[in-house]
Amino acid sequence: MAANKTDANDADGLARLAEAGFFRKVRVKGFDDSMLTRTLVAARTRLVRITVELSNQIRGIMKTFGLLVPASKGTTFEKNVRGLLIDHKELALIVLPMLEAWRGMRIRAAEPSMPHTDVDPRHRRHYRNVFRYCH
C-alpha cells in the first residue's frame, strides 16, 4: 500500500490488482452506441410530455369558459378544439397559439432523428415506447 494517495500510486495499485486477477474485463459502452440513443429517447420523451402538458392546459383554459373538449388525441383533439372555438373569437386568440405549439411539438416528437435500422436491438424497446405516444 502506498503511503501517499497520488495518481501514480493509484495506477500502480490498480495494476497490481489486475495482475492478481481481481479485475475482469468489461465492455466499455461506445459513445454512439449508448449515449446518443439514450439522449434521443430522453429528448423524445420530454417532447411527448410537453404535448400532454399543452393539451391539458388547453383543456383547462377551455373548461374555465364552459367548453369541454371531448376525450380525444391527435388530429381529433385539434378538430374538437377548433370546433368549440368557432363561436368564441376572443378565446380563440389565446388558445390557437397554444394549439399550434401543441401541433408543432407532436410533429417534432414523431420525427425520427435516427433510422430504426441503425438502432442497437437492445434499445429498440425504448423507441417503441416513445413512438407509441407520438402518433
Image (tube, grey):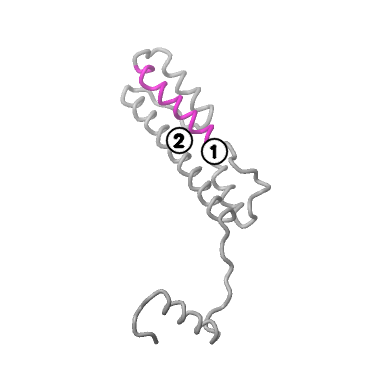
* Residue 98 % position (x, y): 40, 26
Q: Residue at x 42, y 21 (%)?
A: 96
Give the SS element for disc 2: helix
Mark 1 neighbour density, 10 Å: few (under 14) some (14–19) many (20 or more): some
Compared to 86, does 22 lie above or below? Answer: below
Residue 66 placement (x, y as % from top left): 34, 23
Q: Secondary structure at mark 1?
A: helix
Membership of 71 in magenta stretch: no
Extreme-front residue of the structure: 8
Corner quadrant of residue 86: top left
Q: Position of residue 118 (x, y in %)?
A: 66, 49
Q: For residue 51, which numbered disc appears in the image?
A: 2
Mark number displayed over residue 92: none
Q: Residue 16 location, x and y as percent?
A: 50, 84
Locate residue 127 relative to residue 14 in the image: left or right: right
Query: What secondary structure prevails in the magenta region?
Result: helix
User: In which quarter of the view is residue 107 placed?
Assistant: top right
- Packing grade of label 2 (10 A; few <14, some 14-19, many >=20) is many
* Residue bearing the label numbered 1: 134
The magenta segment is 91-109
Q: Amino acid at mark 1?
A: Cys
Q: Residue at x 56, y 37 (%)?
A: 110
Q: Earlier in the sequence, mark 2 or mark 1?
A: 2
- Camera-side residue of 108 and 21: 21
